[in-house]
Image: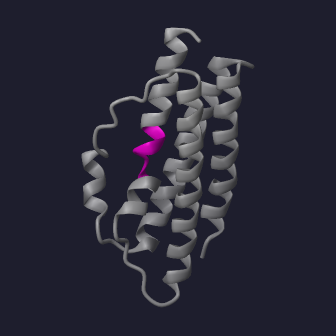
Amino acid sequence: MSPADSQRLQEVFRREYRSLLQYVRQASPYAAGPDRKLLEGVMRIAAEECSALDAFEEFLGANRVPLPRMGSFPVAFTDLNFVGIRYLQPRLVAEQKQDLVKLEADAAGLGEAPAGEALRQLAELHRRHLGELESLR
């Protein structure tokens, strides 16, 4: 694997691990009454993506791509602590759309190599989760 491909994979891993969805998983969104079902759905989706990232981490290790320095979540996310899950839902949908576009572009840049396939699998999961996030009530 070329150094450029390794760097791209590291950036994808860092970006996905520090996404808004993963931040919300660790934050404390407020949900009362009927919003609890929405919160449960968002947390399930976030947990599934975290599991996929764990598998991606194993792929990186198997291909001798060192894990990047993770750093912290974007500072702008701190404004989203302790807010209602209804307030977060449109933001999660918008970010999922942006992340999907980035993942598809990264996968295309890697071609048919195993690394490209790994990113296509992440993109497919994002696509499915985007539909779920949009339909959660």
Residue 97 image offset from top left, x and y in percent: 57, 46
Q: Residue at x 41, y 69 (%)?
A: 87
Screen quadrant of the N terminus:
top right
Q: Is residue 50 magenta?
A: no
Residue 55 image offset from top left, x and y in percent: 59, 42
Looking at the image, residue 17 sits to the left or right of residue 81; the answer is right
- What kind of secondary structure does the magenta stretch mostly adopt? helix
The quarter holding residue 32 reads bottom left
Looking at the image, residue 19 sits to the left or right of residue 118; the answer is left
* 27 to 49, vertically: above or below: below
Q: Residue at x 61, y 71 (%)?
A: 136
Looking at the image, residue 92 sits to the left or right of residue 106; the answer is left
* 21 to 124, vertically: above or below: below
Screen quadrant of the C terminus:
bottom right
* Residue stretch rendered in magenta on the structure: 15-20
Q: Is residue 19 magenta?
A: yes
Residue 45 image offset from top left, x and y in percent: 58, 61
